[in-house]
Amino acid sequence: MQKFAARISYLGTRYCGWQKQHGSAAEGGPSIQSCVEQVLESIVNEPVSVVASGRTDAGVHASGQVVHFLLKRREWTAEVLRRALNSRLPPSIRALKVQPVSLEFHAQKSAIKKQYSYYFQQGAASHAPVEAHSWWIHRSLDQRAMQEALEELVGEHDFLPFQARGAKVKTTVREVLEAQVEWIPLPLGYPGAWVLPGDSGAFGFIRVRLVGTGFLKQMVRGIAGTLLEIGEGRRSVHSIREILKTQDRSLVGPTAPARALWLEQVWYDEFS
């Protein structure tokens, strides 16, 4: 019996999310979990259940999702599994790393912390190659105001107002360890990519990066929607402080589109 962990990257655009769906829920496209499981089963010739560090929603992308799975019938090497997966998975899903782990390892329960980033695209027009992976905002956003507001999230708080309606968890208290707003130039030599934000002709991303011990359903997207209004000057930099204090969901901004959200990294003691 062997247990493996794998780091998976994927573009969530055409998928209904990470988790397998049944019945009418599956009409939004296949799940990433079902695709990985089906391919893995075709390789190892046995039933396989793939468990992820967390369930990303429909349209959300990942560059560092981590999963684990158990194989019982024969011995495999990690590199053979990685190559076999990438030879059969669709181009939108890739196994970046496969590593043997102890039987006690659990992709979700063993996670120490996670990093999500939300990408607001800035510039006079949206660049088509990155439109499906970011949210273009024509108005120039106030990065300093967004950073000041974001710092209110650091620490342990009840994030209930930022949770999607109807979600059920034992507790809505989470701890945010890092919260940062930064300018990221557009890659691949786009015109204006190396111009500083705010300058004429600047194209790039304002990246909202959050590291925490855990996140609620649509929590980052609720934070991003609130930060957008702060960056546009439509609400106070103290809005997030007020939301956490009052627990008033009506004060939260619109839920930002899923396409600009990325699960980028999950930390463990055993898997790196």
Image (cartoon, grey):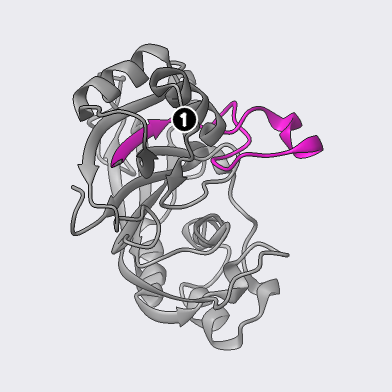
Q: Position of residue 145 (x, y in %)?
A: 39, 65
Identity of the residue drawn at 52% across and 33% down: 32
> Is 190 positioned to the left or the right of 132 in the image?
left
Q: Residue furthest bottom?
A: 245
State which quadrant residue 209 falls in.
bottom left
Identity of the residue drawn at 18% across and 47% down: 272
> Is 235 positioned to the left or the right of 231 in the image?
right
Q: Position of residue 23 (x, y in %)?
A: 79, 36
Q: Residue furthest top?
A: 87
Q: Position of residue 146 (x, y in %)?
A: 40, 62
Question: Is 111 drawn above or below residue 188 in the view shown?
Answer: below
Question: Is 166 drawn above or below residue 257 in the view shown?
Answer: below
Identity of the residue drawn at 65% across and 62% down: 164
Query: What's the magenta region?
Result: 2-31
Q: Is residue 127 visible?
A: no
Mark 1 lies on residue: 124
> Is 62 positioned to the left or the right of 196 in the image?
right
Residue 11 highlighted magenta (yes or no): yes
Could you say which is closer to the camera, residue 73 or residue 232? 73
Could you say which is closer to the camera, residue 138 or residue 267? 267
